[in-house]
Image (cartoon, rainbow, N blue to C red):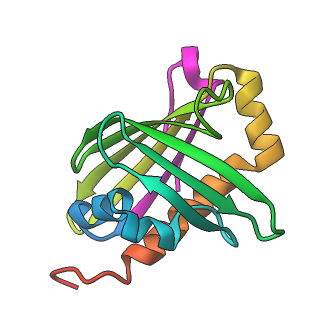
């Protein structure tokens, strides 16, 4: 899980997490874009996710709650900004509509033979905002755990050649 480099202009506002996933890009994309799959792996270890609404299209919204292992509920709202199957997703992620703490996530899917490299880039409005989510919510470790859960889930899906 290597972190990619960023330009100096945004590197202090960005979190980058990468993971190689065993499986073709088409299958990894499906795990990210279909609500039937997302509920099985989305969020860090110990969390579960309850979806209230899901509309996978540019301008569409995924409204959900992440339930922490300690019983704390975390409201989440993702607005899909760009959907380029099976290569790239861009979305605005926050607690709700007009959340001043929202950030932009860009996820890329690069197929390398029988594996897919998934890279999540989270871009925050300021270094202070980025630092807060790293310190308060352990966002880097949470991102690594989330990608780990996704990789484990994708490994359970039927795929030609496995």
Q: Residue at x 68, y 19 (%)?
A: 126
* Segment colored magenta: 1-20
Residue 13 falls in image quadrant: top right
Whether 136 is drawn above or below 111: the answer is above
| x and y, in percent, of residue 128 in the image | 77, 24
Extreme residue toward the left, this view:
160
Quarter of the figure with the C terminus: bottom left
Extreme residue toward the front, this view:
52
Counting the numbered discs, the total is 0
Q: Relative to the observer, which residue lies in front, 153 or 110?
A: 153
| x and y, in percent, of residue 103 in the image | 58, 31
Q: Residue at x 33, y 56 (%)?
A: 33
| x and y, in percent, of residue 144 in the image | 59, 58
Please give left or right for residue 94 compared with residue 7 in the image: right
Q: Is residue 44 magenta?
A: no
Extreme residue toward the top, this view:
9
Q: Residue at x 50, y 20 (%)?
A: 7
Please give left or right for residue 127 compared with residue 162 in the image: right
Q: Residue at x 28, y 40 (%)?
A: 83
| x and y, in percent, of residue 100 in the image | 67, 24
Q: Relative to the observer, which residue lies in front, 17 or 74?
A: 74
């Amino acid at each position: 899980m290597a972190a990619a480099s960023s330009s100096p202009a945004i590197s202090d506002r960005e979190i980058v997490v990468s993971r190689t996933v065993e499986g073709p890009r088409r299958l990894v994309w499906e795990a990210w874009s279909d609500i039937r799959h997302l509920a099985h792996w989305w969020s860090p270890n110990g969390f579960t996710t309850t979806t209230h609404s899901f509309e996978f299209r540019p301008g569409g919204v995924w409204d959900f709650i992440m339930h922490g292992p300690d019983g704390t509920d975390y409201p989440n709202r993702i607005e899909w900004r760009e959907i380029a199957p099976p290569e790239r997703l861009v979305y605005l992620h926050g607690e709700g509509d007009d959340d001043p703490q929202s950030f932009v996530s860009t996820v890329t899917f690069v197929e390398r033979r029988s594996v897919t490299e998934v890279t999540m880039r989270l871009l925050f409005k300021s270094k202070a905002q980025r630092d807060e989510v790293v310190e308060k919510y352990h966002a880097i470790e949470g991102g690594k755990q989330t990608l780990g859960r996704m990789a484990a889930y994708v490994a359970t899906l039927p795929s030609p050649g496995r």
